[in-house]
Image (cartoon, grey):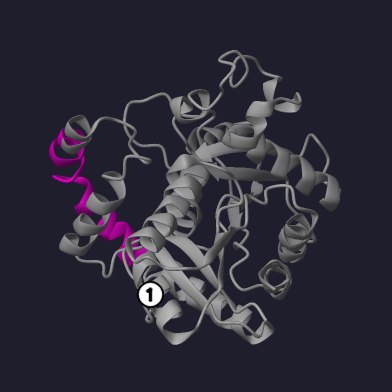
Amino acid sequence: MVKRAVLLANLGSPDNTDVQSVRRYLNQFLMDPYVIQLPWLFRRLLVSLFVLPSRPKDSAEAYKSVWLDEGSPLIVFSNRLQQALQEQVSIPVAMAMRYGKPSIEQQIIKLTEDNDLDELVFIPLYPHFAESTVTTSIEQVKKVITQHKLAIKLTVIPPFYQQQDYIMALVNSAQPFLEQPYDHILFSYHGLPESHITKLDKSGNHCLKNGSCCSQSHQANSTCYHHQVMRTTQCFVRQAGIDKNNYSVAFQSRIGRAKWLQPNTEDTLRELAEKGVKNILVICPAFVTDCLETLEEIAIRGQQVFQQAGGEKLTLIPCLNDHPDWVKVLASWSE
């Protein structure tokens, strides 16, 4: 009988809300070559000279505004998900963070020491492909297995942006909010520099070349973040029965001066409010777990932006977190 275990992976979080903890986390995150895709020296100069002197202080204040008694929201909700999944399956389940604690290395070593494993089922908790999330997590797992000479089979669950069971779980988790009166629903996805997408288009003439590229069948779609988020949106609105005039798509969390995916979420919130939208729902399907980017960037800052532009109410639809339907989906992928 094959002995397997499941390793879930999320992005990570600082250990605490003090500036030093946030600086340490940001340094690890931003120095990943899959995140800032520049040669090491340029990346080091950019992070050390332009990010770390000021951003940790601002980010620390943002974290304080959403920090829970138990700790970081992302860590707390991720642990709840791990516990809920463990109750549904008969094999060991662990949760790791790509940056911060517990690390992927720590959790793999613990799983292999506590269990005589033949196979590790690795589930990166990112619905859409990006090198800065999916690839870096998978490569880290492979690195740990190689360095520690672990004789285990690695099975990776690929991005699930259009998997029917995932879409159904997403719609079901949002349904109580969709049943309430609202004027518009905004799908806000984590942004990405356009270069991260176009560099993966081997043809060089498809991704982001025209307004209809994402609706066309092309080999680049398997690694195109923009195509995949648009596909998730399309599947969601069809399943939920949302009118095509009642939703829009935008991208949040932009940093730096590189050209990022457009339109920007804050700009879109202003424009919608100025057009007379008073009551808006915002859903963030790029995240399966509520975190700084949803709880502070959308629910707090987004609310302020929307109201200052003339809107009245912004409601954040929670991420999947440990919703029972999502736990069932993960259980079906695990065994």
Residue 104, x across and y down, in percent:
39, 65
Q: Is residue 65 above or below residue 114?
A: above
Residue 45, x across and y down, in percent:
15, 34
In the image, the segment drawn in magenta is 45-65
Q: Quadrant of the C terminus?
A: bottom right
Q: Quadrant of the N terminus?
A: bottom right
- Please tell me which residue lies in front, 117 or 301: 117
Compared across the picture, whether 88 is left or right of 307 comes to: right
Say which element carries label 1.
helix
Compared across the picture, whether 58 is left or right of 238 comes to: left
Question: Per the image, is 171 magenta?
Answer: no
Residue 63 shows in the view:
yes
- Please tell me which residue lies in front, 301 or 20: 20
Residue 292 shows in the view:
no
Q: What secondary structure predominates along the stretch shown in magenta?
A: helix
Q: How many marks?
A: 1
Q: Amino acid at mark 1?
A: Ile
Residue denoted by label 1: 109
